[in-house]
Amino acid sequence: MISFAFTDEQEAFKTTLRDFAQNELAPGYPDRAAKADFPFDVQKQLGELGVLGIGLPEEFGGTGDEDPILLGLAAETLAYGDVNVASAPALLGLVGSQLAKGSREVQEKYLPGLIAGEITAAIALTEPGSGSDASALRAVARPVSGGYRLSGEKTAISLACSAAVTLVYAREPGSARSRGVTGFAVPMDAEGVTVHHMPGMGCLPLGWGSIHFDDVFVPESAVIGDPGKGFQAVMNHFDFSRAALGVMCLGAAQASLDEAARYATVRETFGKKISEHQGVSFQLAEQATYLEAARWLCYRALWLRETGQPHTALASMSKWWPPMVAKDAIEAAMRIHGNLGYATEFPLQQRYRDVMAYLVADGTAEIQKQIIAKELLARTAG
Ligand SMILES: Cc1cc2nc3c(=O)[nH]c(=O)nc-3n(C[C@H](O)[C@H](O)[C@H](O)COP(=O)(O)OP(=O)(O)OC[C@H]3O[C@@H](n4cnc5c(N)ncnc54)[C@H](O)[C@@H]3O)c2cc1C
């Protein structure tokens, strides 16, 4: 018999984070979401709650081994209060776990501050000419005495405006596609680094932007993982950040659906509560069903990761469908609120704009479906 239960420890962590999300995060969400300032005060609170060290080395304040389910639970639960704040464990899980594979110098310089919430780290793979086709990246790392010189432009980078360090992917001169790509930990105050803020329709506090590298020197110690194997490493990490981002979007959708259910029991039309109109109650029922199905898809992908089983296709399923389900549920919640759903005084429209980001970030639906189809077709052909 299989079990869908979380452990006692996971349940306790979830309870702590649920209280924090509802009492501390939710009231300030609209104000934070309206500004392009990274909320370091909240990030430090996340550090104190142990959210930022999930799966990162214990010696720097982390929990130790990779813990995909706990990471997913943290992202989902925090998103109930503030979906932008909730991206912290997923983003740090993606970047921090790779920095942990860097030199001792890189680990000591960045991991304690990241885990405590004092600094942030970005990951820069996308370029103006390569997003979905990520292995077409053109940024170059030229070997020089004592290190490398990096040149190129990265675009659409979350946390570009607040990061102390960015994990940058660049290729050795003359290499092509996924070969010869290496990850480098580049301090954002290095000479030759410039950042341009690119405000989006949501996720403003994440300080989205492009980063230019103009012959930036980095020492040998900045290399992360095996030189030339950076592309494979980042793809492997996407396999769990994708499911964590999927379930995070569902947390924001659940908050919206709960608000819609509460509203439906007080708003009256034609002499009865709108929850008594089947046109409304069936919408709530349908969206609740989709959220439940999408949620377990994400946790199954995270569980496969945790138990060391193949999970690439499920991670891609968790990235294309749950954010779509979340967006549709938030939209339904907005419609159930009538004109109030459109009003900026309520958080629904803000959540809609924030969640929309994850239809593209970390790979679009079309790219996820390609990955799923490739595995499915290989399996049926074999
Ligand atoms: C909010 C946000 C945050 C982001 N944060 C980061 C970050 O921190 N770091 C980072 O490196 N990147 C980041 N990105 C970039 C993101 O990963 C890319 O935008 C994404 O991979 C798509 O690339 P693109 O924008 O170049 O679109 P393109 O690759 O140009 O795609 C355009 C359209 O064509 C479709 N398409 C492309 N190829 C195919 C195909 N073979 N078959 C079918 N359809 C196809 C796509 O699905 C899309 O609809 C972020 C993006 C957003 C929106």
Image (cartoon, grey):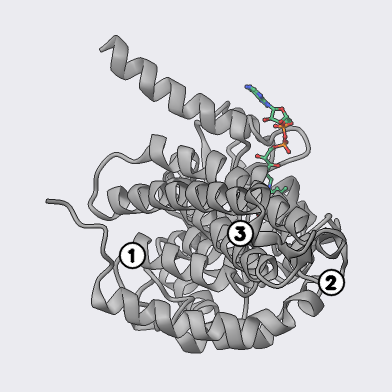
| Residue at screen point 72% across, 77% down | 29
| Between 299 and 148, the one nearer to me in the picture | 299
User: Picture coordinates of residue 348 (x, y %)?
Assistant: 75, 63
| Residue at screen point 78% across, 75% down | 30
Instruction: Mark 3 or mark 1: name the one nearer the start of the chain.
Output: 1
Left/right of residue 349 with respect to residue 107 in the rendered view:
right
* Tag of residue 253: 3
Q: Is residue 226 visible?
A: yes
Q: CA distance from mark 3 to mark 1?
A: 24 Å
Instruction: Mark 2 or mark 1: name the one nearer the start of the chain.
Output: 2
Check mark 1 vs ligand 1: CB closer than 8 Å? yes or no: no
Residue position for label 1: 67
| Between 255 and 154, the one nearer to me in the picture | 255
User: Picture coordinates of residue 138 (x, y %)?
Assistant: 69, 35
Say which quarter of the image contains residue 256.
Answer: bottom right
Amino acid marked by disc 3:
Ala
Rendered view: 337 above or below 120: above
Q: Secondary structure at mark 1?
A: loop
> Dot 1, crowdedness within 10 Å: few (<14), some or many (≥20)?
some
Residue position for label 2: 34
Q: Secondary structure at mark 3?
A: helix
Amino acid marked by disc 2:
Ala
Amino acid marked by disc 1:
Asp
Instruction: Mark 2 or mark 3: name the one nearer the start of the chain.
Output: 2
| Residue at screen point 33% across, 49% down | 300
Q: Secondary structure at mark 2?
A: loop
